[in-house]
Amino acid sequence: MDKIVYRNGAYRYFRRNKVVTETERLLLTDKEREIDMKYTNVGSYSTAIAIGMTKVKEYPDNKNGMSYTYAIRREESVFGGKKMDGYVYVTLRQEPQLKDRAAAWFQSKWGVPQEAYLECMDAYLNNETEYGWYLCLDEDRIISGCGVIENDFHNRKDLTPNVCAVYTEEGYRCKGIAGHLLQIVVDDLKSKAISPVYLLTDHTGFYERYGWEFFCMVQGDDEPNMSRMYIHR
């Protein structure tokens, strides 16, 4: 980790000779630099500590005659999301620049056309729906994710909305990541008065760990066998 700066209310990681996104540049505007200095100079360090910030490293800025004496960050705030067990959980609205990468990642896991994911994500980002998309990151790598859609390709159109595309990279399984992610989804939907929520799966004994209950069997589109429908109330 080479530098952390305060940008529009969120703390972003920067690594040597690389920025996380095109819009997150080390060359800040004068206004952004002024905001950054508010949280990083010596005079505000004690205040920063008092509100839960942590010293990281010194970053003098000789070129601009300023001293980034203290770079600080909120322990729970990385990529604008929530940090648990070293991983960061975000909604796509918190990090919209991840949209194309997320759509490609979901497509690689489930084989559904990338355009279908992008259509749903755009509707969410444009506030046309509250059915969102949720990601877990290890630094800047997507390691788990899921979405919420109207119907996950089954015959019970009355059972809506549906959590879909739940996936965790193999090397990150059995760490509780999917459980954390699913709880974030449920809490987010409940905060918007959306409850219950349903989930279609062939797994047994997994979702029960996280408060989901078996509800009924449903027929998936173009599927020879019926699948299990779960509910979270």
Image: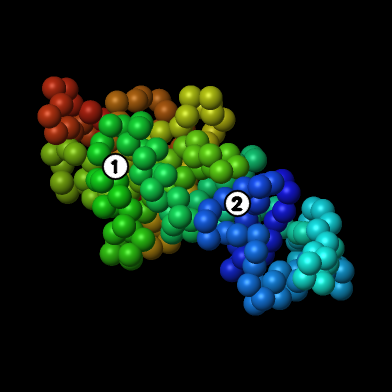
Residue 74 x %, y %: 70, 57
Q: Residues within 10 Å of mark 1 (few under 14, many from 20)?
A: some
The disc at residue 19 is 2
Residue 175 x %, y %: 56, 30
Q: Residue at x 49, y 39 (%)?
A: 142
180 relative to 131, above or below: above
Residue 158 x %, y %: 17, 48
232 relative to 44, above or below: above
Residue 9 x %, y %: 61, 67
Can residue 27 be seen in the rendering of this structure? yes
The number of numbered discs placed on residues in the rendered structure image is: 2
Q: Residue at x 82, y 53 (%)?
A: 57
- In the picture, measured across the screen, residue 155 lies left or right of residue 107, that is left
Amino acid type of the residue that numbered disc 1 sits on in the rendered structure: Gln
Secondary structure of residue under mark 2: strand
**Label 2–label 1 contact, CB within 8 A:** no
- In the picture, measured across the screen, residue 107 lies left or right of residue 219, that is right
Q: Residues within 10 Å of mark 2 (few under 14, many from 20)?
A: some
Q: CA distance from mark 2 to mark 1?
A: 25 Å
Please tell me which residue lies in front, 232 or 148. Answer: 148
Q: Residue at x 15, y 46 (%)?
A: 157
Amino acid type of the residue that numbered disc 2 sits on in the rendered structure: Val
Res. 4 image quadrant: bottom right
130 relative to 226, above or below: below
Q: Which residue is mark 1?
A: 114
Secondary structure of residue under mark 1: helix
Q: Earlier in the sequence, mark 2 or mark 1?
A: 2
Can residue 193 be seen in the rendering of this structure? no
